[in-house]
Image (cartoon, rainbow, N blue to C red):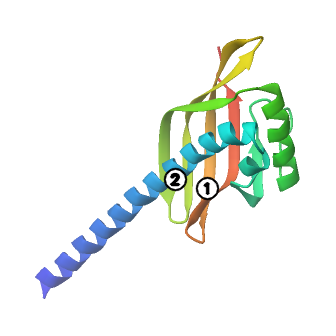
Amino acid sequence: MKKVAISSVALLLFAASAAIADDKADVKAAIENWGKTVADGCTSDPNKIANLYAKDGVLWGTISQSIRSDAAGIQDYFKGACVKLPKLTVEFKDHLVRVYGNAAIDSGTYVFSFEKDGAKTDLPARYTFVLVKNGGQWQIVDHHSSAMPQ
């Protein structure tokens, strides 16, 4: 009986570890998708970016002096950012993903590249994304980004 109990516990721990590993990969993929959507959205429709945020999502953007705490504010931020940062792309340098059940945090750095006066310009920044799993999908509920200190 003890062997069965120990085997069951080991199996549950292994399953939980595998689920967390899968969730970590899914969170990283969701954030990488955010970066691709920023590049695509800035050339087509900035609202596509805002759609990655939960309805009550919050954004403290890299080039904003104010926090955006509703869908309209997040849409407004990306419309302005796409104009200020033409041909915008995002390259993630690292991810530190932690999963806590249906919530996850990804902290790291990324580089925004855009065209300024005909030349490529880089804006290194640090970020924290907080996501919640809703209906099997990871949605951004809080996003803070700030330019990397010199």
- Asked whether residue 142 appears in the rendered view, the answer is yes
State the CA–CA distance, disc 1 to disc 2: 8 Å
Question: At 83% across and 30% down in the image, what residue appears?
Answer: 83
Element type at mark 1: strand
Q: Are marks 1 and 2 in contact (CB under 8 Å)?
A: yes
Q: Residues within 10 Å of mark 2 (few under 14, many from 20)?
A: many
Question: At 70% across and 30% down in the image, what residue appears?
Answer: 146
**Could you say which is closer to the camera, residue 6 or residue 80?**
80
- Residue 100 located left or right of residue 122: left
- Residue 134 located left or right of residue 93: right
**Could you say which is closer to the camera, residue 120 or residue 22?**
120
Q: What amino acid does circle 2 point to? A: Val
- Asked whether residue 70 appears in the rendered view, the answer is no
Q: What amino acid does circle 1 point to? A: Leu
Element type at mark 2: helix
- Residue 55 located left or right of residue 98: right
Question: At 75% across and 15% down in the image, what residue appears?
Answer: 116
Which residue was labeled with disc 2? 27
Q: Residues within 10 Å of mark 1 (few under 14, many from 20)?
A: many
Residue 123 percent location from the top left of the image: 66, 21
Which residue was labeled with disc 1? 131
Position of the N terminus by quadrant: bottom left
Residue 38 percent location from the top left of the image: 68, 40
Residue 49 percent location from the top left of the image: 72, 47
